[in-house]
Image (cartoon, rainbow, N blue to C red):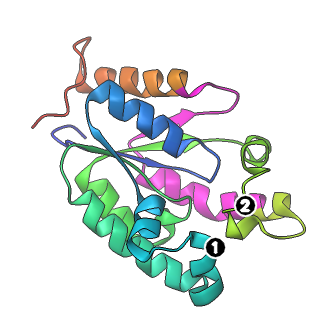
Amino acid sequence: MFGKTNVFLIGPMGSGKTAVGRQLGRLLGLAFRDSDADVVARTGVDISYIFEQEGEAGFRARERESIERLTALDRIVLATGGGAVIDPANRRALAERGVVVYLQTSVEQQLARTRHARHRPLLSVADPVRVLEELLDQRVPLYAETADLTVSTDGRRVGAVAEEILRELHRAKGGPAPYNPSP
């Protein structure tokens, strides 16, 4: 797991990947990147528009390109989209090029955190709870298979989650010395 200079966050929407990633990047002194934000920046349109025009398959192709490029960078913390693990190429790139942290959260917490979000095309349905449950059923095995570490975010503040990840990285490295992602 170590010798890798990147930390990649995976998990369902609303698990806190972007907020925790920013904080973790500051704590580690690494640049922060977000694959969804990268897709938006490269296309000039929001994810909902991509879903409307190209469907989920079109978005996933763009996401795969983004993850391939971003995971090839050095010394970054990357927040991925909730469905990034669906693609075997993404899982492989993440596992080979960084320490992968699964931010685990419940459907209830996801719903609370995403309730007012307008940029979540998969939740633009009559029964978002059912969608969240189905997505978790499909994706949890993929998150677990890909992750080096799993950290729960339910009912926790961003800083506490980032600090726990930092502690787990230190512990996995074998001691109390601060985690240094340098090669």
Please state which of residues 141 and 61 is positioned toward the viewer in this rendering.
61
- Asked if residue 150 is among those painted magenta in the image, a careful observer would answer yes
First-in-chain label (2 vs 1): 1
Image: 38 above or below 20: below
For this orientation, the residue located farthest to the front is 44
Q: Residue at x 39, y 31 (%)?
A: 24
Instruction: Provide the residue designation for mark 2.
Output: 118
Q: What SS does tag 2 mark?
A: loop
According to the image, label 1 marks what residue?
Answer: 48
Above or below — where is 136 with respect to 158?
A: below
Q: In percent of the image, x 43 and y 31: which residue is there?
A: 23
Quadrant of the rendering where the C terminus is positioned: top left
Kindly give the residue lying farthest to the right in the view shown.
126
Asked if the residue under mark 1 is in contact with the one under mark 2, i.e. CB atoms within 8 Å, the reply is yes
Type of amino acid at the residue the image marks with label 1: Ser
Q: Is residue 178 left or right of residue 153?
A: left
Task: Name the amino acid type tagged 2.
Answer: Arg
Look at the image and say whether residue 163 sits in the magenta stretch: no
- What stretch of residues is rendered in magenta? 132-158
Q: Is residue 172 visible?
A: no
User: Which quarter of the rendered picture does the N terminus lie within?
Assistant: top left
Residue 56: horizontal and vertical position, in percent? 59, 80
Front residue of 67/31: it is 31
Front position in the image: 72 or 134: 72
Out of 119 and 55, give the one closest to the viewer: 119
